[in-house]
Image (cartoon, helix red, strand yellow):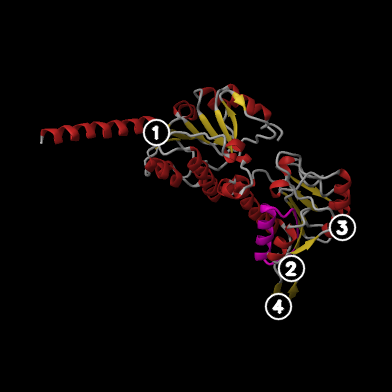
Amino acid sequence: MVREKRWLGIAGTIIFGIRRLTRLTQLKIGINRENAPGENRVAATPDLASKLVSAGHEVLVEGGAGVKAGFPDDTYTDVGASIVGSAKEVATSSDLLLHVGKPSVEELGAMRVGTTVAGTLDARRDIEVIEALAKAGVTAFAMDLVPRIARAQSMDVLSSQASIAGYKCALMAADSLSRFFPMMMTAAGTIPPARVLVLGAGVAGLQAIATAKRLGADVYAFDVRAAAGEQVESLGARFIAPRDADDAEATGGYARAQTEDENERQREFLAEHIVRADAVITTAAIPGRQAPLLINTETVGRMRSGSIVIDLAAETGGNVEATVAGEDVVVNGVTVKGPVNVPSSMPYHASVTYARNLESLLDLIIGDDLGLVLDFEDEVVDAMCVTYNGEIRGNTIGR
């Protein structure tokens, strides 16, 4: 009996020690309010916070971080998270800081060496923020560098947010246009449907096509990738393309950058379709590069007065020559809109989908002992981790 009690005592000590070690290796995970002007999203929803707390982590949330997205502070405290008074305090206390965008200068100054940050860092273009993260000794994961492979789809922030942007752009076009989108049978006669042209059939473009079709418009679409034609037509739209055009699909499914000669031929082909459209939605973008110019001002001026152009690529230079990011420009009675950060205009579901993308990343980089496990042999971790041990990793900038 004495021997049995002795072994039970030893077992209890071991179990206590394991539990103590587990508590020591749990992460303090911070969620701060976004600092970019006009940003309404939050990186982690109460649902994600609940899962992290249940796993054994401590979750710190800056007061008011989720309010604009529809998640007041009590929705976080109800699931076991703690509300903290300032972004600086969260940054100082956190082992892992979650962001939609980039951390502020104040946050960077407050972070301890070895802190890990995950956010949409614009890593291909914003050299300064990547250098600042490396200088601060922060390990940074760029959510905008998720590789386009099957096992990383659940982390693909660009796709989840582009889908929201495409949907919202179709609604913006319908709301701004002085005509009905659907065909209307009225006592005063039949009104034909609006003609909508979508340029670019990536995730955003396909969602814009689907939404415009659901609203009853007559939809046409163009893309430089031949494979996009089948996707467009599966949504009930008509695919247009010049004869004998070269396929411009690059590795990963994105469109490759084209020569100026190719761009000029495309502009000439598209001009006649554009001038017949009531609404044009442009979504053509190449990650990390200037958006291709698809529509010049002369072509916009030939459209019917009252027509609308929504340029979703406004933030990266625009697909339309007349576009000014964040503004409406009127050319001969045609309004060219250059909306910025469109997903933020639907912050609830934009935050929900972004948080799910983050959750998939955390599942990959947090081990069973609740600590971070960075396996650079994993192609997803290798592609997304842009700074580590005070250095910029690989060819992050400009790749």
Task: Give the numbered dot on residue 244.
Answer: 3
Residue 259, x across and y down, in percent: 85, 44
Q: On screen, 264 above or below 376?
A: below
Q: Nearer the viewer, mark 1 or mark 2?
A: 1
Label 2 packing within 10 angstroms: few (<14), some (14-19), many (20+):
some
**Which residue is labeled 4 in the image?**
187
**Residue 385 left/right relative to 191:** left
Label 3 packing within 10 angstroms: few (<14), some (14-19), many (20+):
few
Q: Nearer the viewer, mark 4 or mark 3?
A: 3
Q: Nearer the viewer, mark 4 or mark 2?
A: 2
Looking at the image, can residue 37 be seen?
no
Task: Name the residue nearer the viewer: 205 or 349.
Answer: 205
**Residue 39 left/right relative to 320:** left
**Which residue is labeled 2 in the image?**
193
**Which residue is labeled 1 in the image?**
26
Q: Which three-letter amino acid code belongs to the residue tagged 2?
A: Pro
Please give the name of the residue rendered at 73% of the width and 60% of the height, measured from the top-left corner.
Answer: 178
**Which tag, 2 or 3, sits closer to the chain's start?**
2
